């Protein structure tokens, strides 16, 4: 997997050693980490879960299911610098962002790349939007965020290693991948801001583990197929085709229904029919219980 730190090189061999345990916070049974309490759980004795500091604060505006998201991956390994902000924002206490100190990471038409910002030294917070793909534009237009500048990756990868399907085509990556890549670009643009002891790629610690676990399952389970692993581009393309066919089927059904109603209306107006046909009522009679 790209951008993997050397310390993670032998993690694949230890995948089976991770155990499911009860979270001491919420008491739920979890494996790898708790997506509610953001605690690492069940790590093998020979695996050290990273605890790192980041050169910028990361706010992840969140409207999704935590168990399906990669946002907790970052919160677990960088708890002091990553904040998950639920959306919709609370009306009584919405967050406030200074236009000079915060930017939204979103590839809008007017988005700049990080090294183009003239006041880069004033930047303190990167804001990411984590939600179903189609909801992101409306969140971006929320008054809490709409006054902020947008930045985008200078060189976004065409393919994501994420295992969750989406219909937006190539060039879309998971939240934790975006955080990692954007921070990498920031450190290149402003080397003095980097923490000497921090390997930013350790943000991918749990992403790597979950990715390798899913891939390993498809490679070793005789009831599964390697090419059907959800992070493979072939499987993503197959899912897109299936979704497209399903949506096209729904569209044709609606078009046929509308055409039928239009024909009925024309027949009624022309006198071919006396009136609109009555809907067939379902039999609702029930037998009496003696």
Image: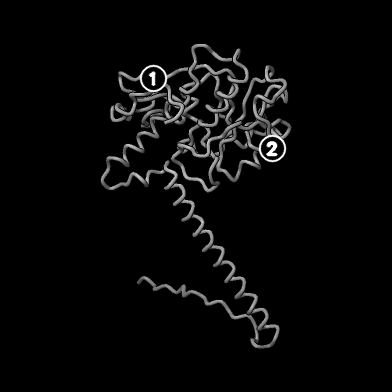
Q: Nearer the viewer, mark 2 or mark 1?
A: 1
Report whether 81 appears left or right of 273: left
Of the 4 image quadrants, the one containing the C terminus is bottom left
Can residue 266 be seen in this snapshot?
Answer: yes
Which of the image's four quarters has the N terminus?
top left
Q: CA distance from mark 2 to mark 1?
A: 40 Å
In terms of image quadrants, where is residue 179?
top right
| Residue 177 pos. (x, y %) | 51, 31
Residue in the image at 45% along x and 47% along y: 236
Q: Residue at x 46, y 26 (%)?
A: 3
Q: Residue 37: tell me if it is visible.
A: no
The part of the image, by quadrant, that contains residue 154 is: top right
**Sequence order check: which comes first, mark 2 or mark 1?**
1
The answer to whether residue 31 is above or below residue 219 is above
Disc 2 element: loop
Give the side of residue 25 with respect to residue 156, left or right.
Answer: left
The structure residue drawn at horizontal position 60% and vertical position 22%, both measured from the top left corner, is 186
Q: Which residue is mark 1?
A: 7
Above or below, comparing residue 40 to residue 172 in the picture: above
Q: Which of 91 and 174 lies nearest the eye of the viewer?
A: 174
Query: Which residue does the image show at 33% across and 29% down from the upper left?
Result: 12
Residue 56 pos. (x, y %): 59, 20
Kindly identify which residue carries mark 2: 142
């Amino acid at each position: 997997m790209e951008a993997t730190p050397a310390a993670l090189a032998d993690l694949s061999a230890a995948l089976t050693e991770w155990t499911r345990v009860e979270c001491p916070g919420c008491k739920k049974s979890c494996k790898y980490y708790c997506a509610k309490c953001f605690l690492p759980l069940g790590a093998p004795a020979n695996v050290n879960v990273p605890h790192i500091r980041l050169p910028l604060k990361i706010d992840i505006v969140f409207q999704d299911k935590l168990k399906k998201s990669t946002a907790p991956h970052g919160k677990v390994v960088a708890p002091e610098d990553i904040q998950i902000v639920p959306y919709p924002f609370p009306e009584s206490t919405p967050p406030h962002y200074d236009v000079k100190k915060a930017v939204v990471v979103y590839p809008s038409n007017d988005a700049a790349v990080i090294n183009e910002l003239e006041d880069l030294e004033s930047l303190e917070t990167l804001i990411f939007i984590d939600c179903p793909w189609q909801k992101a534009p409306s969140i971006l237009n929320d008054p809490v965020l709409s006054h902020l500048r947008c930045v985008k990756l200078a060189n976004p990868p065409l393919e994501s290693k994420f295992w969750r399907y989406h219909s937006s085509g190539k060039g879309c990556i998971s939240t934790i991948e975006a955080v990692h890549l954007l921070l990498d670009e920031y450190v290149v643009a402003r080397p003095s801001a980097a923490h000497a002891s921090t390997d930013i790629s350790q943000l991918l610690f749990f992403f790597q583990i979950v990715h390798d676990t899913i891939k390993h399952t498809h490679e070793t389970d005789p009831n599964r197929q390697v090419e059907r692993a959800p992070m493979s581009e072939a499987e993503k393309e197959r899912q897109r085709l299936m979704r497209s066919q399903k949506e096209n089927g729904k569209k044709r059904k609606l078009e046929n229904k509308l055409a039928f109603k239009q024909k009925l209306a024309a027949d009624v107006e022309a006198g071919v029919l006396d009136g609109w046909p009555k809907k067939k009522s379902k039999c609702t009679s029930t037998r009496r219980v003696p």
